[in-house]
Each structure stands twice: as structure tokens, then as C-alpha cells.
Image: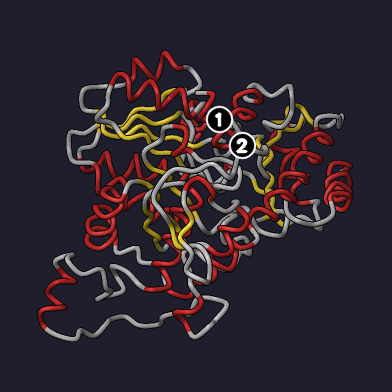
Amino acid sequence: MANKNISVHTFGATIGTVLIISSKNIAMKNDNKLAFATRAIHSSYDSSTAEGALNPPIHMSSTYSFESVEQGAARFAGQDSGHFYSRISNPTQDILERRLADLEEGEAAVATASGMGAISATLWTILAPGDHVLVDQTVYGCTFSLLEHGLKKFGVEVSYIDFTDHNQVLQGLRHNTKIVYFESPVNPTMRIIDICAIASIVKSHHSDARVVVDNTYSTPALQRPLTLGADIVIHSLTKYLGGHGDLIAGAVVGSSAMMEEIRLTGLKDMTGAVIAPLSAFLVLRGIKTLELRMEKHCKNAQQIAQWLIQHEAVRQVYYPGLSSDPGHSVAASQMRLFGGMVAFELKDGFDGAVKMLNGLTLIKRAVSLGDSETLIQHPASMTHSTYTSEQQAAHGISRSLIRISAGLESAEDILADLERALEK
């Protein structure tokens, strides 16, 4: 486990195959691979192949011509790597996928039209009626809705347990468990799950099950689940990786074989959740500044959490960067920084939360996260409203819980707006 933690903190360390990194077409080997921030800008694109264009071209084409019938047949059969229809692949999308795989230290990636497209394509590809999914007690509201109203409807068994209790995980595994699914940090409660420990339990006792981690909150700039033993990583690219609140997209990262299966089954045939070339381009643009932005998001979130925990109106603050947080030590072992998301509850409960939210002027009342703007929302009535009141209580989503996505503004201005709103 110690070596795996080192791989998270040391961004020069890597696994995987040789990748084409620079515009001079230099193959970088594992022992001297470029740093994360450099790869986020240069990986998988050679400007000399695009007439020197510094940014990858946006290939706005739905279909691609063949030099011969034989070439077309070979592409459909997977014997020729060229493109043939943009529901399967696109040159701009291809650059994005290879860059994402590089940054997450996986073999391959599949980009999709949304985060839910990525989740759906993955689950529908792997699961069949009679299979079982073991899920942490709290996940994103639409993920929960897919599990409850989609998978269960088609005969897939789903059970929820507390993944911070490793005995529950061990006991929750069944002979038909095909996926073990969780987030860390958890949306919206900020619980931290030990990725390495969960992966170790699953691999030791049920090697056929795949460990799937939603890494949207952390991004590969802070945490890389594949290096900790996970099999598949999922992202809503809409959030930090896009970073500007101007696109909807998702991605799955893992082994080449699994990604090919998800592309040709879950994406091509079952969901059709195809990313647009312009969206792929915008995500590539956002990734260039990912590490820089994440450092500022995390710094602001840390200041917000430390300020909130001292405020007399606040009952509880949930942020792994606080030494008092139950997940602090695990987060420190698997994350480079503690993330840009903060959750908290007020002493006045739900009514106080509504008054505070409505009293904000700078901070925007909006769902989503990872934008330049600081966003705030009420999970129980917004992102996690797909849970019934009883389910919210059972899954740890309090009616008084508030979630903040720390933006890139001055921390002093964010805190001043919170102070004015809390006075009300």
C-alpha cells in the first residue's frame, strides 16, 4: 500500500505504455515521463500532423470515407484503427481519450456526452439480469436513480452499505457481485473511502468483481484510483476537467479491453451517449489548466472550511482537509490535496439553510461544481432529490446539509458573502 500511495503523490511515477508526448514526436519512456502539468498540455497531440496548429482541430464530421471497400470492412471489423463513424470515434475525441488515459495512468479511455452517459455505458456493458452491484451508502442522486429505477427494473440486484466499514464490504460481496461502486470524496457528504483497502478486499475475496470509482470530485490532479487498485474510473468532465461551466461531457478510464467493450456495447449500441467534437475540444482546453486551477480550488475550500468551523451559526463542517474530519488520514494517504468541495450544516437546520442560501449575493445558487464561480446548493432538494425523504435519512443526506463548490475568486470575497448571508 505504501508504494501505491507514493505513486499518487509523485506525479512523475507512472504505469502503462509508451505515449507520444511532444510536438517533435518524442516517445517518453516510463522512467523519464513528463510531469502531470506538462502532460496535461502536451500529451497525445502532435502539432506537426495538423499543419502546426497549437490546439487540436475540431473534426466536425459524422462519417469518414474509405479508400476501398476492403479498408471499410477492416475498420468495421476492428482490424484497421481508422475512424468510420463518429458514434464510435472521432479524431478530436481520440486525442481527449488518450490524454485522459495518460493522466489517470490507465491504458485507454472512452469519452461520452455526459457523466451519466459514462456511468450508464459502463454499467449496462458489464451487468446482466441476475448480477449484483455493491454500492456505497451515498452516491450522486442521478447515479442512485439509475441504480434504483434502471438496473433494478431489468433484474439487477443492488445493495447499499457503508464502505468506510470494511467488514460490511467483505460481508456484502456475493457470488454474483459484478461491480463494487463508490465515490471518494462522496457527493455530497464528503465521506472518504479508502480506495486501496476496498480494492484489496474485493481482489482477495471476489476477483471477478470490478471496482469502479467515480473520481469527479478529485480529478487525476489530486487522486488516481487506478494506481490504488481500482479497475475503472469514471468522470463527469462537465466539472473540474472542463472547468468553465460551458459543456456537458463524461469519461471512463481503464484497461484497453474493457474500454473497447464499453465503446462498442455501452456507448455505440446501448446508450448512444456520444460526445460532440466541440465538447471534446473544450475539455482539452480545460485540462491544460487543471492542476493550476485545482490548487486554487483546494486552497479556497480549505479556507472556507476553516472559517465555517469557527462560526457560531454552524453546527458541523465536512471537509477532509480538517484534521478533525474522520476521513482526514485516509484522504491524506490517497489525495495530493483535499479537494474543492465543502459541506456543512447550520444550527438552525433546514430553515436556516434556506435563509442563508437566499441571502447570498456573490456565491451562485446553482448545482454542478468545478466552475470558476463559487456555487452553492441544497442537496436534499436539488442534486439528491431523487432519494425519498426516508432514503435520504437512511443514506446520510441531511435536510440541513449545504454543499459548496469553492470557485477561483478571492477567498476574502467568498467569506464576506457567507458572513453577510449567515447574519440573516
The quadrant of the rendering that contains the C terminus is top right
Q: Residue 239, percent across and down? A: 57, 55
Residue 370, relative to residue 72: is it above or below?
above
Quarter of image, res 126: top left
| Number of residues whose C-alpha sits closer than 10 Å to that of mark 1, classed few (under 14), some (14–19) or many (20 or more) | some
Which amino acid lies under the numbered mark 1 shown in the image of this protein?
A: Asn
**Neighbourhood count class around disc 2 (C-alpha, 10 Å): few under 14, some 14–19, many 20 upward:** some
Residue 136 in the image: above or below residue 385: above
Residue 376 placement, left or right of 359: left
Q: Which mark is residue 270?
A: none
Give SS at disc 1: helix
Q: Are marks 1 and 2 in contact (CB under 8 Å)?
A: yes
Residue 196 drawn at (x, y percent): 47, 27
The residue carrying mark 1 is 5
User: Residue drawn at (23%, 59%), measured in percent from left and top?
Assistant: 264
Where does label 2 land, which residue?
Answer: 9
Q: Which residue is found at the position 28% from the left and 58% from the top?
A: 263
Q: Is residue 280 visible?
A: no
User: Which kind of residue does numbered mark 2 sit on?
Assistant: His
User: Residue 158 appears at what percent x and percent y?
Assistant: 31, 32
Q: Is residue 244 left or right of residue 81?
A: right
| Residue sitting at x 40%, y 49% | 253
Residue nearer the viewer, 262 or 238: 262
Q: CA distance from mark 1 to mark 2?
A: 7 Å
